[in-house]
Image: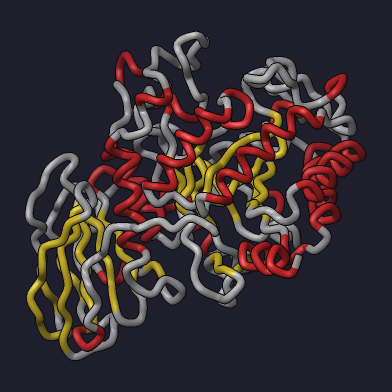
Amino acid sequence: MLLIQNMAQAQILKVSPNKRYIVKQDGSPFFYLGDTAWELFHRLNREEADKYLQNRADKGYTVIQAVVLAELDGLNDPNPYGHTPLKNNDPTQPNDEYFKHVDYIVNKATDLGLYIGMLPTWGDKVFKNTWGAGPEIFNPQNAKAYGEYLGKRYASKPIIWILGGDRNPRNDADIAIWRAMAEGIIAGVGNKDNALMTYHPQPKEKGGSSTWFHTDEWLDFNMFQTGHCRNSNVYEKITHDYTLATTKPTMDGEPIYEDHPVCFNANDLGYSAAYDVRRAAYLDLFAGAHGHTYGCHSIWQMYAPNRKPVNGPLKPWSESLDLPGASDMTHVRALMESRPILDRVPDQAIVATDTYAEGDRIQATRGKDYLFVYTSTGRPFTVNMGKISGKQVKGFWYDPREGTSKAVESMDNTGKKEFTPPSSGLGKDWILILDDATKNYKEPQKIVTKKNT
């Protein structure tokens, strides 16, 4: 029993003391690298779920975002074993047979060292707006009861709770439902400190969850969505939350998906590619996000040939597991974990030249003794030296497509220095790494995942 309690304790995540990052129970940094597998519980059988989760664990993902009451008619369309989640579509009457399948997937993820970013429900079950299968089934009373049921059932599991489900509250009545669900989850878990929680909204011009819940105690970190267009100025969304008076971590929980009709208009704009998802990740993170979420159009809906595609046509989910952008996220994590995470801050003052608009954007971030500069299209740039410690600096050009590095020779950490990436053009993005030479930091290393034992 004590061993089980210790394992559960080790899985608990919390906000870092500086309120910018997520850390483990021992204070070590936790890098949130998510994938949107919204229909995982609803559409995949156990063998398929095993395949999907193993693939993501092998790539170094740390969080799988999945929905219990799923978007695609998740109340009435049964899971692969013929079970629906609720009896009579009543949140106070969960169907244990359905939740046994959820249990299996949560346990498998746990064994692989993954956290489940669990959405109790997609937002159309609170209100449908102009789309969504619904039906609307929640009020504050049953939302609290349902939240308590989930909290109690998964209290000992590595869960990050994500409310909202792609909906922006319309009014105080909607807000009351989400607050009641959060209250129920905390009651079920038994301790607020053991229930890390956020809110997944739709895209907004500014902010996301911070619009409605920023000062709520249950909201541990902010989440926004930039959606599926290319020029969404992701760094401005991060900056909005980052500079709020009450400090909380923030991140993009649903950026542009790979292999998605750009702005839902494939005829004119084509489909998104690895470069699109890669650029969004580095711009987000270097602007101050604590983590990032990847998405793939066929994987979020777990599309299979016997199903009607959403915004199709599509390849089956199993044929999209190894798209280039999905593998590029492995390199994202390798870079971010290669240097001390918890003292990293955004700092555009590092760059002395024009940082340009989204298409050619140059974004900079630093710790106390290292800095990263991302150039979206390989444009050369000038760095204001002296922003980090050390009389001498050295580093690397990091290739975000391959996860490989080219050494940068040692130089004085004074004045202004011009840097020209190894290549330039559309899709030829690069990251400059400069380090205090006395630290002897190594080039980013390939992620080696460890299973829980």
Question: Is residue 130 visible in the rendered structure shown here?
Answer: no
Q: Quadrant of the N terminus?
A: bottom right
Q: Nearer the viewer, residue 319 or 172?
A: 319
Q: Position of residue 280 (x, y in %)?
A: 36, 46
**Residue ID at (22%, 88%):** 438
Is 270 displayed left or right of 227 in the figure?
A: left
The vertical placement of 205 against 419, above or below, is: above
Is 272 displayed left or right of 424 in the figure?
A: right
Q: Position of residue 206 (x, y in %)?
A: 54, 47
Q: Quadrant of the C terminus?
A: bottom right
The vertical placement of 169 against 389, above or below, is: above
Q: How is the image coloured?
A: secondary structure
Question: Is residue 255 visible in the rendered structure shown here?
Answer: yes
Q: Position of residue 323 (x, y in %)?
A: 31, 33
**Residue ID at (74%, 69%):** 2
**Residue ID at (41%, 19%):** 316
**Residue ID at (69%, 57%):** 219
Q: Nearer the viewer, residue 212 or 260?
A: 260
Q: Nearer the viewer, residue 103 or 25?
A: 103
Is 151 displayed left or right of 322 in the figure?
A: right
Is 187 displayed left or right of 7 in the figure?
A: right
